[in-house]
Amino acid sequence: MAFSFLNKLLIIFIFIFISLSSSSPTISLVQQLSPEIAPLLPSPGDALPSDDGSGTIPSSPSPPDPDTNDGSYPDPLAFSPFASPPVSSPSPPPSLPSAGVLLISLIISSASFLAL
């Protein structure tokens, strides 16, 4: 009995997966992007850009590398192994379970209810 239930459950999951993946409309990447971003990406039929520099974005000086330490000040994130970690912002709220987890728990609970 349990084997047929697992087969039915597997078929239900496969059906849901196929229906969800095929129901999403297929929109090209360029249609999804905003007009400000689309010109920055190459289109599928374009030739390679020339090296005249007209298509490049001018760069600005980068900020200093945080990995290089000159030793003039202690690292504020470093703490000894026996000390408590530094107090920082509160932890992010816990994430909600995904729809798949909720669907699985609903199917299992309803199947166990029907088995009674």
Image (cartoon, rainbow, N blue to C red):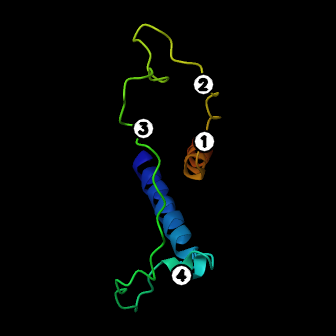
Residue bearing mark 1:
109
Is there a contact, CB below 8 Å, between mark 3 and mark 4? no
What residue is shown at x 49% (from left), y 23% (from top)? 76
Res. 27 in view: no
Q: Nearer the viewer, mark 3 or mark 4?
A: 3
Q: Nearer the viewer, mark 3 or mark 1?
A: 3
From the top left corner, tell me how far across and down residue 36 is, in percent: 61, 76
Identify which residue, 16 or 51, lies in the foreground: 51
Sequence-earlier tag: 3 or 1: 3
Residue bearing mark 3:
66
Q: Residues within 10 Å of mark 4 (few under 14, many from 20)?
A: few
Q: Indicate which disc residue 47 carries.
A: none
Residue bearing mark 4:
39
Q: Residues within 10 Å of mark 1 (few under 14, many from 20)?
A: few
C-alpha distance separating marks 4 and 1: 51 Å
Is 61 left, or right, of 89 in this rendering?
A: left
Is there a contact, CB below 8 Å, between mark 2 and mark 4? no
Residue bearing mark 2:
88
C-alpha distance separating marks 2 and 3: 19 Å
C-alpha distance separating marks 1 and 2: 41 Å
Kindly identify the amino acid type of the residue bearing the numbered disc 4: Pro
Q: Quadrant of residue 30?
A: bottom right
Identify which residue, 35 or 101, lies in the foreground: 35
Q: Nearer the viewer, mark 1 or mark 2?
A: 2
From the top left corner, tell me how far across and down residue 46 is, in percent: 40, 91
